[in-house]
Amino acid sequence: MSSPTALPKRTIIKIFIILFILCYVTVQLKIVSLTSNVPSHLYHDFAPSEEEEERKENHNFKIIILTMNRFESLKRLITSLQNTNYNNDTVDLIIRFDFPKVPSDAWRAQVSNFRNDLIWKHGNVNISIATENMGLRKAWLTAWQPSSLTDQAIIFEDDIEVSPLWYAWLQGAYAAYQNRTDVAGMSLQRQTLVPHKSHRKNTIPDNNGQPFLYKLVGSIGYAPFAPQWMDFLDFADCALATSQSVDTPNLITSDWYKSLDQTGMWTQLFIYFCNYMNLYTLYAFPSENHALAAHHREKGEHYGKSEGPDFALVSNSNTGWKMEYPSHLIKLDWDAKPNVEESLKSVVLSAAVGYEDADFIRFVESIRAHYQGEVVLLVRDNASASLFNMLEKHNIQVVKTEEAGGERTSPAWYRINTLRWQFYQENCIKGKHDVCMAVDFRDSLFQDDPFRGMTLPPDGGGIDSSVLHVYEHNLPMNEWHISEAKHCRGRFQVLYNTQIINAGGFIASPPALPILAKWVSVDAKRCDDQVAFNLGVHGKELKETKVISHPQGEGSINNVAWGGKFRRDSRQRFLNHNCFPAPVVHQYDLLGKD
């Protein structure tokens, strides 16, 4: 075989140039174009380096920075983050650039240069650019989507600088408080705003440098707790889609939200959310007027001109501040004064006769996920020992009965129905309980504290008053109710032109239950309890009782079947019209059958 002919030197150079160009183009194709604008995605990501690809995914902590065109501010923040001791933890850095309203080649070049110059040795780096101008509100609402209930992240705007101690304090606070359900998240800010319009001159106490809870969020370095942030994102999605009002009475922030460009203010949504859910933000104010994060208050969404840092940063050497995490935390209300919370003395009652163990497991798991108060069930006395053990384990009280129940309108059904109303009034006790909820057992689903939003006393009147909360179907009164009502005591004509009220779930004060029970099980004369309930309410037969009727989709119990209108969130929870999960959902199993 003859030897191959050597290529001319000029040809070799041409081939080398062609290969170099091909390699360069290939590399560039891996980097997302700064000018692309695909409407189906909010952000385009830069391709990660090979070293970043090799790192493990789903690390425990993420730093998220929201920025657009303040490059020097961004570099200052990252420098302070790089000077933090992360105790060998893997910490991912996520930088989200908003797209300017008027982008320029110079801006694109600055973004590219920033990416090329960035060095981050603590974890993965992800830099993304919005496909449109989002505004600050949308930037926050899309900043972080937790993938689990234990995910951890902190969100920064770019005009912030952090103390070297911020991460150590935050991790200590996670260890001490992450499982608390009354905390929405933690802030590095040294908050100064008191939003209550009647108490604007109040000051927030430093609590001797120890952590405390305050109703108002602090966005200068905010670390949301994942479960509460998931709930907030679902609420915000619904509220914006339905133009839900987030006006919070007596707070100056509501006035700001009405008067300013709402796309630049995410915090009013969160304030409204925390007010409804009774959530707080955790703070710590280091001694000598220092802070864990300084806000440089630079020109942008909220400042017409740059004003400089608000506080000096705390370090190991400049104060004697100690990081402590007491189990008891003081709670400050919107006026920055201690909030003395009074809890309702409540009970949930349900007749659970004739059901399978699976029904008990579903009911108990559902209610105990959201409510740790008193629960009493009426149960057949021949239920299995394992069932009674399960109820005892979950602190569910039991009243036993020999009655087995039966088909609707049968003698056995009337006996158990009479017994049910007797059970309700005997276990809703004046002096022991302020408010009592009675619900059907098989088809009630708990999604939140069933008494969310209720205050002492439940009607705003005297503690001894007779109050009944009833919950409507989204359905006008039908012929079945009217036909059945003709066989009952009471004027059936009162049912015309009314909404159907569901007897399978209501809330009553202890004085109201004997009045209601007497009407339904005695005075209405062997009337179907559903019909008797409607006759009693619409016919004003419940003497000296204040009846509060809630339209479908409002209040504690949402009757979703038989014409119910509702939205469902990302986790398929049924929402009330206020965009929060309905505390109790009734007849969810009938959807599609009505």
Image (cartoon, helix red, strand yellow):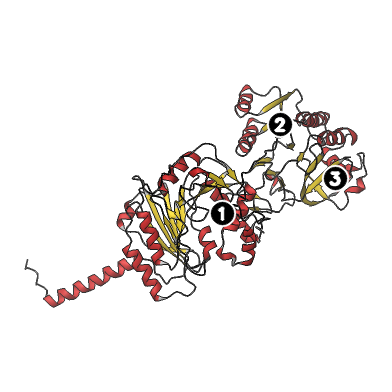
How far from the left and from the top, in percent, is residue 237?
59, 57
According to the image, label 2 marks what residue?
352
Task: Using the rendered image of the protein, determine whether residue 186 is visible from the camera's viewpoint.
Answer: yes
Mark nearer the viewer, 2 or 3: 2
**Labels 2 and 1: the sequence-earlier one:** 1
| Measured Cα–Cα span from mark 1 to mark 3 | 41 Å
Please state which amino acid type lies under the numbered disc 3. Answer: His
Query: In which image quadrant can residue 556 be found?
Result: top right
Query: On the rendered image, what quadrant is the N terminus found in?
Result: bottom left
Q: Say which element carries label 2.
A: loop
Most foreground residue, 460 or 386: 460
Taking the view exactly as shown, the residue that stands out farthest to the bottom is 10
How far from the left and from the top, in percent, is residue 431?
76, 31
| Measured Cα–Cα span from mark 2 to mark 3 | 25 Å
According to the image, label 3 marks what residue?
481
Left or right: 162 in relation to 388 = left
Mark nearer the viewer, 2 or 1: 1
**Labels 2 and 3: the sequence-earlier one:** 2
Please state which amino acid type lies under the numbered disc 1. Answer: Leu
How far from the left and from the top, in percent, is residue 275?
63, 50
According to the image, label 1 marks what residue?
233
Q: Is residue 267 above or below residue 3?
A: above
